[in-house]
């Protein structure tokens, strides 16, 4: 088996959407769905742009899809050839993880179309494809290509006032509706055979009609190069796109491809986890990392990764806690610069978090649950549509999922613990931690009769139970945030003895610091080694029934399980790891026995309705010496974007796409779970717990700026 690629033979119309995700190519700046060259909006072809958002009317704000300049449609003797409409003899679609390539190979009666596509990892603004056409008989061929502006949108359109430019390099430029951000796309086409070209501008873009007489002896190669710039990159994106396209066209497809493949090779050098013993699993792990790298913002100093990556506009292209908890640790251990980029996004969006806290009448930083550019909250008050009535349902993710601020502070602190680098604290990460702590302080209640501090009316990671009191995950992450705020003084003083005091004065934090000191021991949950931890106040009093019981109560498979009337809300059935997630994030607070006790209680009560759940269960199962139990969760996490798994609906809302958190989760399970890697204060240790399927794991890590190569086998390990 080739563990570096995934190939699907044949064509099934119902798989078009799924395949768009499985075969995605991207470079962090943009993602191109795994669609055929000749497809358009109906097949959800899309060039999804990272970080460019737009709102059309009252619709949800979502990221913008750029016009598609890799569109290429072949007609033979006047017959348009389209996979899905034209009968075909053979068809396959492949994604090559090692080189970041999308390959299609379709044999129709009239023509054999092969194409290779890449979104350059070496040049963020560049994408290209190479079509190879061959024919059985002499025929007249027309290639219709150009820049298609009739693009797939969920809540669009988002691009207006198109301007077009004809020439060797053609260009389409438009502006977004809300913020008037210019988006420019260019295209050049190189054919190494005699042909005629006509250009035209019609409603749906600027096109080239390339005609030629084909014979059965010749293989016809067509190279398409495209560039994309927006007003967020430069003042004159049209000019920037044009000049890059000129250079890239002069260099030729081959040279650009070479640079792209080299950039991927460098990425794999720093991140490959070589898993031996099970090729299916090895391929799934490669696929997971491929997807993760394809959407990582290497082009930026301060950006993050949306919960559905760059696979489209689902989840509003927003950044969730997924990034800090499931993706950030991968990069903190392998590519700290990228980890920093992700955290800087939160530093830059601090003003948005301060504004959100103020909106709810709190102080400090309450980060957006679904964060868009500048920290704008993308989460609405009605995030689910009732399948029966078609009415929007009031959900409380936006208002009550306050653990988000603690998750962010947690990641800021982990960055320091893993890399030993304090510089980010001076770039305002320290301020983020203090402002998050201040938020929890102002959000907490003092229970005078019990000498306790509580967080009331919250939603924990388990979203099926809304508006609960003292969700233990939330209390623990908030207490940790308090502890980090208090520890900052010592850590900062090592580099600059005055900085902490300066910050405290600047933020007028003196009094808050005292309050935090007093509140911490009263908020921090106390865990009894022998008892199962109650997820929130009153959880044990809820109906204790089986997952099957609850599933059996559904009247519609797309019904939402949470909210007021949700089938899970009055039961102990939970959506995803909650207590278990806390145990995974704070391993030193729990003994192996305690983890096992709680895992055994909560796992059967967990629907795993979120792709985030498997990873936490696998990590904790490794912890208490049951990698065999972890295996199933590992496979689930690692294969999600190979099989096109995961939920596709939340009520009536489409939520399909790729699953970055599960992709990152696969790495976390392999490295932190099975190999048992731990990095604390620059010290790297492993405590292997390989499941029977794995004979060895090899991977690189970076800790405190030093590179290590780690090998773990069934009965030995090596840290070099
Ligand atoms: C999960 C959240 C997650 C979000 C984005 C939801 O279904 O419950 O925890 O952050 O999806 O992945």
Image (cartoon, grey):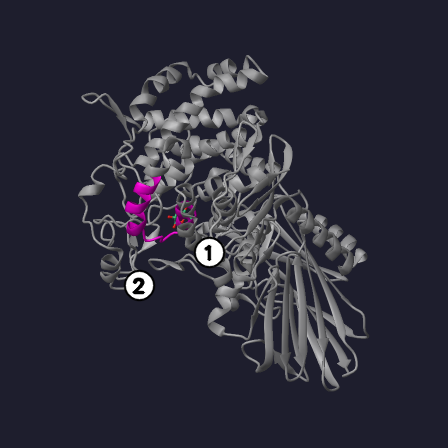
Rendered image: mark on residue 557: 2
Which residue does the numbered mark 1 point to in the structure image?
Answer: 635
| Residue farthest along the bottom direction in this orientation | 137
Tell me residue 178's x, y (percent): 51, 48
- Front residue of this view, candidates 341 and 617: 617
Q: How many marks?
A: 2
Q: Residues within 10 Å of mark 2 (few under 14, many from 20)?
A: few
Residue at image position (47%, 57%) is: 640
Of pointers 1 and 2, the one earlier in the residue sequence:
2
Tell me residue 100's x, y (percent): 64, 57
Q: Residues within 10 Å of mark 1 (few under 14, many from 20)?
A: some
Instruction: Work out whether residue 178 can be spotted.
Output: no
- Front residue of this view, candidates 359 and 213: 213
Determine which quarter of the picture holds residue 419: top right
Residue at image position (53%, 19%) is: 492
Tell me residue 342's x, y (percent): 54, 38
Determine which quarter of the picture holds residue 130: bottom right
């Amino acid at each position: 088996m080739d563990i570096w690629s995934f190939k699907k033979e044949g064509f099934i119309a119902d798989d078009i959407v799924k395949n768009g995700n499985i075969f995605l190519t991207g470079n962090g700046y943009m993602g191109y769905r795994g669609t055929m060259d000749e497809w358009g909006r109906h097949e959800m072809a899309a060039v999804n742009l990272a970080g460019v958002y737009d709102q059309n009317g009252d619709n949800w704000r979502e990221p913008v899809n750029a016009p598609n300049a890799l569109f290429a449609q072949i007609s033979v003797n006047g017959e348009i050839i389209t996979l899905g409409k034209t009968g075909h003899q053979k068809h396959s679609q492949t994604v090559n993880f090692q080189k970041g390539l999308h390959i299609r190979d379709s044999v129709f009666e009239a023509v054999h179309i092969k194409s290779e596509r890449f979104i350059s990892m070496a040049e963020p603004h560049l994408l290209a494809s190479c079509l190879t056409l061959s024919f059985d008989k002499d025929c007249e061929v027309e290639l219709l290509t150009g820049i298609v502006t009739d693009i797939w949108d969920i809540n669009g359109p988002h691009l207006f006032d198109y301007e077009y430019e004809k020439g060797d390099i053609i260009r389409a430029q438009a502006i977004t509706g809300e913020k008037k951000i210019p988006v420019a796309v260019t295209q050049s086409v190189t054919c190494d055979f005699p042909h005629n070209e006509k250009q035209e501008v019609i409603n749906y873009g600027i096109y080239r009609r390339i005609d030629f007489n084909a014979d059965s002896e010749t293989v016809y190669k067509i190279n398409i190069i495209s560039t994309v710039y927006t007003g967020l990159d430069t003042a004159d994106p049209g000019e920037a796109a044009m000049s890059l396209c000129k250079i890239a066209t002069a260099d030729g497809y081959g040279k650009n491809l070479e640079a792209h493949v080299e950039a991927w090779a460098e990425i794999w050098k720093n991140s490959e986890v070589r898993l031996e013993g099970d090729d299916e699993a090895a391929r799934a792990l490669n696929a997971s990392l491929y997807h993760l790298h394809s959407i990582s913002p290497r082009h930026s100093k301060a950006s993050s990764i949306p919960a559905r990556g760059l696979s489209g506009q689902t989840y509003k292209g927003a950044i969730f806690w997924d990034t800090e908890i499931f993706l950030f640790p991968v990069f903190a251990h392998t590519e700290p610069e990228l980890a920093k980029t992700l955290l800087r996004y939160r530093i830059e969006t601090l003003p948005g978090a301060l504004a959100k806290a103020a909106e709810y009448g709190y102080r400090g930083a309450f980060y957006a649950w679904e964060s868009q550019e500048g920290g704008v909250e993308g989460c609405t008050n009605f995030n689910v549509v009732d399948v029966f009535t078609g009415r929007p349902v009031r959900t409380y993710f936006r208002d009550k999922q306050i653990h988000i601020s603690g998750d962010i502070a947690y990641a800021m602190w982990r960055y320091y613990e893993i890399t030993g680098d304090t510089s980010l604290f001076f770039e305002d990460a320290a301020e983020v931690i203090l402002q998050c702590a201040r938020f929890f302080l102002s959000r907490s209640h003092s229970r005078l009769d019990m000498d306790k501090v509580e967080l009331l009316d919250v939603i924990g990671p388990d979203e099926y139970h809304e508006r609960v009191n003292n969700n233990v995950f939330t209390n623990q992450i908030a207490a940790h945030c308090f502890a980090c705020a208090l520890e900052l003084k010592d850590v900062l003083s090592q580099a600059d003895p005055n900085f902490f005091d300066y910050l405290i004065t600047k933020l007028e934090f003196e009094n808050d610091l005292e309050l935090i000191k007093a509140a911490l021991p009263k908020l921090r949950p106390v865990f009894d080694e022998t008892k199962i931890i109650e997820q929130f106040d009153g959880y044990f009093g809820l109906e204790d029934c089986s997952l099957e019981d609850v599933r059996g109560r559904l009247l519609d498979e797309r019904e939402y399980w949470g909210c007021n009337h949700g089938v899970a809300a009055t039961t102990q059935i939970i959506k995803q790891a909650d207590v278990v997630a806390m145990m995974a994030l704070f391993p030193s607070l729990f003994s192996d026995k305690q983890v096992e006790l709680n895992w055994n209680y909560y796992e059967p009560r967990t629907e795993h309705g979120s792709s985030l759940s498997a990873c936490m269960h696998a990590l904790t199962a490794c912890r208490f010496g049951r990698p065999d139990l972890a295996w199933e969760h590992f496979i689930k996490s690692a294969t999600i974007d190979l099989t096109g798994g995961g939920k596709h609906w939340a009520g009536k809302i489409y939520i399909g796409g790729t699953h970055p958190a599960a992709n990152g989760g696969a790495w976390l399970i392999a490295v932190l779970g099975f190999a048992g890697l731990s990095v604390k204060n620059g010290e790297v240790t492993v405590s292997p717990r390989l499941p029977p399927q794995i004979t060895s794991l090899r991977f690189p890590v970076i800790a405190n700026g030093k590179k290590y190569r780690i090998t773990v086998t069934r009965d030995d390990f090596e840290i070099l």
